Image (cartoon, rainbow, N blue to C red):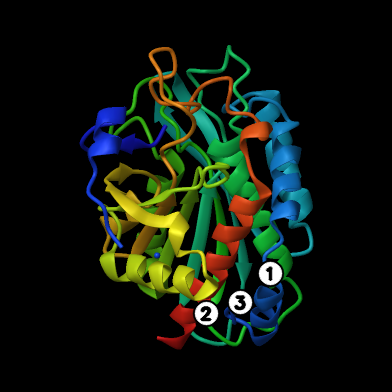
Amino acid sequence: MKRWTNSRSLTFLIAVCSLAIPSLAVTQAHTASRIGFNGSHAYQYAQDLVNCGPRWIGSPGHVCAENFLKKQFAKDNLEEDTFAANTPAGMMTMHNFIVKFPGKKPGIIVLSSHYETNYPLRDIHYVGANDGASTSGLLVEMGNILRGHTLNGNSVWLVFFDGEEAIQQWSAADSLYGSRHLAARWDRDGTLKRIKAFLLVDMIGDKDLDIARDQNSTPWLLDLVDQAAKQEGDQSYFFATTNAIEDDHLPFVQRGVPSADLIDYDYGPHSVTLPDGYHHTAQDTMDKVSARSLSVVGQTVLETIHLLNQK
């Protein structure tokens, strides 16, 4: 459950202030990005994850999602980062997945998502079509673009986080298990020093796409995303409002890694019965997700990577 730092209410969302938003790491991938990120493919991968059913940690759906990711990246440099987390429900085994596409430059650009669903909602058949599946589908399609090319720029690593959601109730200790674990690990082994930028995508499959400017992200990196979106002609989908989100980028921000959270927290109509819209409800299903939104974000991310490689 990512969380507003100040408020998660609709009142806060409406009151936020207004603002004015590819060769990749590879020459070949830049040509591909000009053709266009295939949002329809990303949508189908999201559907495949939703077909696993609820993906809360320890469930059959969670195992299904893990196997799906392993299958998609079986021919790539896939690392399974398994760790034990102490949670309010006891010790839990969690699994991050890291797919590495090496580049000629020494830096690393990380593109990340979480893939599991909310543990407290495990009894309502919550499948997280937008919240977890859409962004994981986007990363899988990004892998298709990166695969088989020599990266002339920085390496691009795709990271699928486990344990983003709270196990009982959101707090600093009960949330972001996978990203906290990996940020600490990469801090110890020196990997963090090589990360040029950390890009997180979350809840960006919404048909009514409206990505807010996150105040917990690195300003210059958001400016670069803004530039990329403008170059792609998609600036209307980005940064019309501001927010402050607690999400998987925070453990990296706190360690000085330039990080950006691209998230559309305003998901679905808000009402007395649905104060947060479709977020964390059984209505978060594939009919609320748009291949067009996935194309917009995927294309913008491709151009952002291109711009990062020019810095």
First along the sequence among labels 3 and 2 = 3
Residue drawn at (51%, 86%) of the image: 105
According to the image, label 3 marks what residue? 102
Q: Is residue 180 left or right of residue 269?
A: left
Q: Secondary structure at mark 3?
A: loop
Above/below status of 99 relative to 30: above
Q: Amino acid at mark 2?
A: His
Please provide percent x and percent y for residue 159. Answer: 55, 55
Q: Amino acid at mark 3?
A: Pro
Image coordinates for residue 15, horizontal then vertical, percent: 23, 38
Q: Quadrant of residue 38?
A: bottom right
Instruction: Give the percent coordinates (x, y) of residue 204.
Output: 52, 47
**x 39%, y 68%: residue:** 226
Q: Earlier in the sequence, mark 1 or mark 2?
A: 1
Residue at the spot of label 2: 306
Tell which of 9 and 56 is nearer to you.
9
Name the spot of residue 128 as percent of width and height, x first: 58, 31
Mark 1 lies on residue: 36
Question: Does label 3 or label 1 sit earlier along the sequence?
Answer: 1
C-alpha span from label 3 to label 1 = 22 Å
Classify residue 191 by image quadrant: bottom left
Real-space Cα separation, disc 3 to disc 2, in angstroms: 15 Å
| Residue type highlighted by circle 1 | Gly
Is 277 left or right of 44, judged from the image as shown?
left
